[in-house]
Amino acid sequence: MTASPRRLGIAGLGMISRFYLAAAERLPEWELTAVCDLREEALAPHRGRVACHTDHREMLAAGALDALVVAVPNHAHAEVCADALRAGVPVCVEKPLALDPADGRRLAALSREHGVPLFTAFHRRYNDRVLALLRRLPPPDAPVRVESVRVRYLERIEEHIGADTWYLDPARCGGGCVADNGPNAFDLVRLLLGEHPSEVVAAEVVRDAADTDRQAVVELAGPGGRGRVELDWSYPGEVKDVLVRLDDGTELFADMLDGRPGFKESLWHEYEGILRAFAGLRGLPDPSRAVDGGLAALELVADVYAAETAPGLPAPRAPRPALRAESR
C-alpha cells in the first residue's frame, strides 16, 4: 500500500520557490496544501487551488501541514523556523539556516527539544555531476586519499535574483556572497571531504561601497583535507564547479552546470533531490542530526567575516557584529 503524500506548505514565494513548487508537483511523496507570502500578487496564482496565507503563524495554526519549506528572505529564517518547530512541524529551510550562529544554535536546540527535523536545503548536494564525482572518490580505507577540494561559485548576482532585491541588502541577506552562496560551497567541501569538519585558515574578502561582499577566497583545513572556496557576485557569466585532488596527483572535476545550458536549469533536478531527502527524514531516530550541516556552514560564514582581510592587507579585520533577524 502506498503511503499518503505528506501535506507541504511553502512560506515565501520569491525567486527560489518555483523550484520547490515544481518538485512538489512531480514527486508523489508530497502534496502542496498551503502557501504563504506577504504579497497578494505572489499568492494570486495559488488562490482556489491551495490555502493562501499572509502570515506564517496563521498557516501553522490552521494545522493542515506535515512539513514546511521556509524560503523567505534570509533575515526571517530564524523566526519562521522557530515558530514551525514549536508547532511540531518539520522544516526544510533555504540556506543559510539563520543570520548568525547563535540563532542557528537556538534553532538546533528547538529541533532537539521538540523532536522535529530541521533540514537545510543545500541543493548542490543533489546535483547529478557532483553525485557522479562523489562515486569516483576512493573509499575511506583506500591507500589513496582526498588531498584538497576547490569549489567555485561565480555569477553576477543581479542576473539571478529577479525581484528579490533583499539579496543586495546586507542587513536582510546577512552579508553578501559569503553569507548567501558561501553555505552551499562550504557544504560541498564538507561533503567531498567525507563530512569532516573544516576551519577557516585564511579569508580574503572584497566589498562594495554598500559594504556588500562581492568576492571572496576562503582557505579551509580539517582532518579530511584542505578546501578552497572562490565566490564572486560580479562575475560576467556563471561558473559553478568542483575540483578534487587526490594525494597521488589525480584530479577529478565536476561542472555543476554541464548538460543544462538553460538559465538555472540545473536547479530543477537539484530541488527534487532536496524534497526527496527531506521526505526521507520521516521516522529519523534523531531528528537533530538533520541540523548539523546547516549549523556547520553558518559557523564557517561567521568565521570568514571574523577572519577576513582585504587584498594586500596583512592583518585581519576585527569581527563584525552579528546581524540580528528583523521582525516580519
Image (cartoon, rainbow, N blue to C red):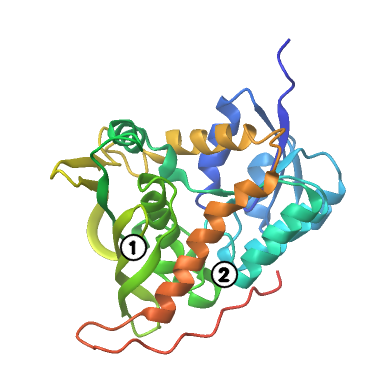
Image disc number at residue 181: none
Name the residue located 35 percent from the left edge and 52 percent from the top edge. Answer: 224
Whether residue 243 appears in this view of the structure is: yes
In the displayed structure, 206 sits above or below 266; it is: below
| Residue 167 seen from this side | no
Q: Amino acid at mark 1?
A: Ala
- Quadrant for residue 40, please give it: bottom right
Nearer to us in this view, 116 or 216: 116
Q: Could you say which is closer to the camera, residue 97 or residue 327?
A: 97
Total labels: the figure holds 2
Where residue 9 sits: x, y (%)? Answer: 70, 42
Q: Is residue 226 left or right of residue 64?
A: left
Looking at numbered disc 2 in the image, what kind of residue is underneath it?
Leu
Image quarter in which the C terminus is found: bottom right
Crowding near the residue tagged with mark 1, few <14, some 14–19, many ≥20 C-alpha atoms within 10 Å: some
Residue drawn where x is 72% and y is 33% of the image: 283
Q: Secondary structure at mark 1?
A: strand
- In front of the other: 15 or 306: 306
x%, y% of residue 276? 56, 31
Q: Position of residue 92 (x, y in %)?
A: 62, 47
In this rendering, the label closer to the viewer, 2 or 1:
1
Give the alpha-carbon distance from disc 2 to disc 1, as whole Å.
Answer: 23 Å
Q: Identify the residue at the far left of this view.
A: 249
| Label 2 or label 1, whichever comes before in sequence order | 2
Residue at screen point 45% across, 63% down: 180
Left or right of 40: which side holds 274? left
Residue 70: percent from left, percent from top: 64, 52
Left/right placement of residue 312 relative to residue 172 reads: left
Residue under the image location 36 percent in, 63 percent down: 158
Query: Mark 2 highlights which residue?
Result: 99
Mark on residue 221? 1
Question: Residue 107 or 61: which is nearer the viewer?
Answer: 107
